[in-house]
Amino acid sequence: MRAARRALGLALLALAGAARAQFAGTLGVDSVNRYRGTGTDDAGPVLRASVMADAPQGAYGGVAGLWRTRDTGLASADAMLGWSGRLDELPGLEDLAPQWAWDAGVRRTHYGHASALYDFSEAMVGLVAPEGSLRTWYAPHYFGGAVRTFYTEINASHAFDDHWHAFAHVGWLHYGPAPAYQARLGDRTDTLVGIGCTLGRWDMRLSRDGIVAGHVRDDIDARRRRAAWILGASVVF
Amino acid sequence: MSLRTLLRGVALGLALTLAGAAARADDAPVPPVPVDAASAPRQVLAMLRSPPAHARVDGSYGGAGYADAARTQAQLRAGARLAAAHGLTLVTLWAMPALGLDCAVFALPPQASLDASIAALQAHAEVAWAQPMNEFRAQGHLDPLYALQPTARQWHLDDLHAVATGRHVRVAIIDSGIDEAHPDLAQAVLAHANFVDGQAWVAELHGTAVAGLVAARADNGIGIVGVAPDASLVALRACWEVSASQTLCNSLTLAKALSFAIEQRAEVINMSLSGPADLLLGRLIDVALAQRQQVVAAVDASAPGGGFPAMHPGVIAVAATDAPPGATGAWSAPARDLPTTVPGGGWRMVSGTSFAAGEVSGLLAVMDEARATADARRAAPALRLVRLPDGSIDACASLLHAAESTPSRPPVAPGCRAVLAAAGAPGRSP
């Protein structure tokens, strides 16, 4: 696994240095940190920063960090490397709209305060449509555990005009067989719906995120974890 | 090396590279500036390849595509980098999702060669192609003549309207501004958009005249009757009036309007204008044709082959019935002494192929509605106009063909009503 992490890091560095790569960064704040329908901590608003690079040939990669505002230090960090391409460039699919694309990648997530126990990696394959996407993520050790997971998500967005847009997300988390010493975790479904406004470099969003069906871990206040409003703003550079 | 160290290294590397890129290119947003006729020939369009939408590392679910501010910012930076490399000025950037590209407009310095600048831009891998900003002119002469509506007689409009009137069919008119408040166009405009930078929407002569010929309302006791009096207009202002006899457009304004019409899935797109062959507009027209939108354009008798976009494959080119044979395959329609709507609530006579194109767009809207009410709708064949022996359009046979979706019908005019009734074309409820 260490070798894989190093390979990911080196590939990101190579992408960052690639000639003609396009770069985009974001700085933002969210009123609460949510991840796939649940709250990951109880530390209030969080700051986000990310940098992504796109090479003309379709490779992309980036890093992102998340910091809590009620204490100090990095809450989590992500590194990602992927490859995407237009489907209408493939034989027999020339009639598709140019927004149709395939997408594949790997992501490594590291949690700052909780040591490396919860770190995990995921691999992803996906399909992108003009106003949506379908992706499946495979994690052999979800949140550092002994259980593998598949997370399948459908995302949709619709722009009403140059500024306003709506977005929605449905995700299904499927747990694989648990080891003998651990009870099998139940699958769950999460949703997110929201509306956003883009003004130049600024993007503001209001969304509702939560678990709508299935298992929720009960080691933290289940009610608070079930659903929450998220108010966020970010600026791109 | 710990993961934390690795991530710090990756972040530092990306940040340093980003800082370098930002230092090379002006990162500030580029405000759109008016694209006026005088500057148009000194501008170049570069179509920038856009990376497909993909998963994001920042925790968002992604997939927003062209609503993605980060993507736009990255393309602006790429445009600024190209401008800096070749001594150009980035004027504006416009997403063209129908092509999967972004259109960057560059202004050339006075001493720069147009051809050399295009070649230099095309040498970059991120540039799909570059082309000059072409200028287009609305066709037709707005000469006051006598009050008469030739299509009413030649195309048997009464009979056609007994079958269909263009109801629920959207006709996008890419032209100058339409007078939406004109009483003969009441409720005719479904949506409008202005693509002429630096100018507010204004009602103008050419666009309003074409709109009236397409969809002036019937049985309201005033004015004229459009060929498709119940059609819905999508008014797209891509041209601007510089004088009473001259209306101009350019590659960018027309491309923006075409993209809008494609996104709106207008069944018919009317382009009563002409200019030089234009790669960007040609690609967008191909997209429209591929999704079964009908594109109608006016023939410019003074241009080789009838001018562009009339000469573009798949476009329904419209010439005047009394014009000498010109563009190969062009359809002829009445083009002289056509009464139509003008800004301010009035009517006057116009002449020219611009207005003949508007009539054909109206006819296609009527045919589309007739097809939609026919059993053959499921097969959704392409609309096909039928030609009379003298080369003019047989409107009755064209409508009959659309309604029945038969591969071919003999010309049926005159006696349109009887033939339509005998053939069982769907009739309109009283």
Image: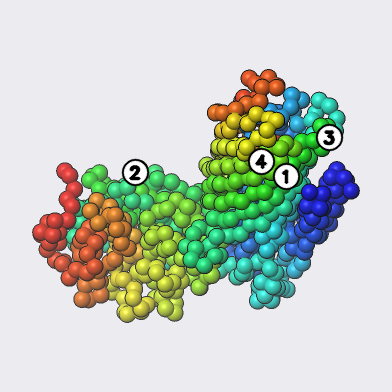
Going from N to C along the chain, the mark reached first, 3 or 1, is 3
Chain letter for mark 2, please. Answer: B
Which residue sits furthest front?
A180
Chain letter for mark 1, please. Answer: A
Say few, some or many: other residues with alpha carbon within 10 Å of mark 2 (under 14 / 14 to 19 / 20 or more).
some
Going from N to C along the chain, the mark reached first, 4 or 1, is 1
Tag 2 secondary structure: loop
Residue that mark 2 sits on = B186
Please report the residue visible at 70 percent of the width from the left and 50 percent of the height from the top: A106
Q: CA distance from mark 4 to mark 1?
A: 11 Å
Q: CA distance from mark 3 to mark 1?
A: 15 Å
Q: Position of residue B100 (x, y in %)?
A: 57, 59
Chain letter for mark 3, please. Answer: A
Marks 2 and 1 close (CB-CB < 8 Å): no
Quadrant hosting residue B121:
bottom right
Is B415 on the left-hand or right-hand side of A74?
left
Residue that mark 3 sits on = A115
Tag 1 secondary structure: strand
Amino acid carrying label 2: it is Ala
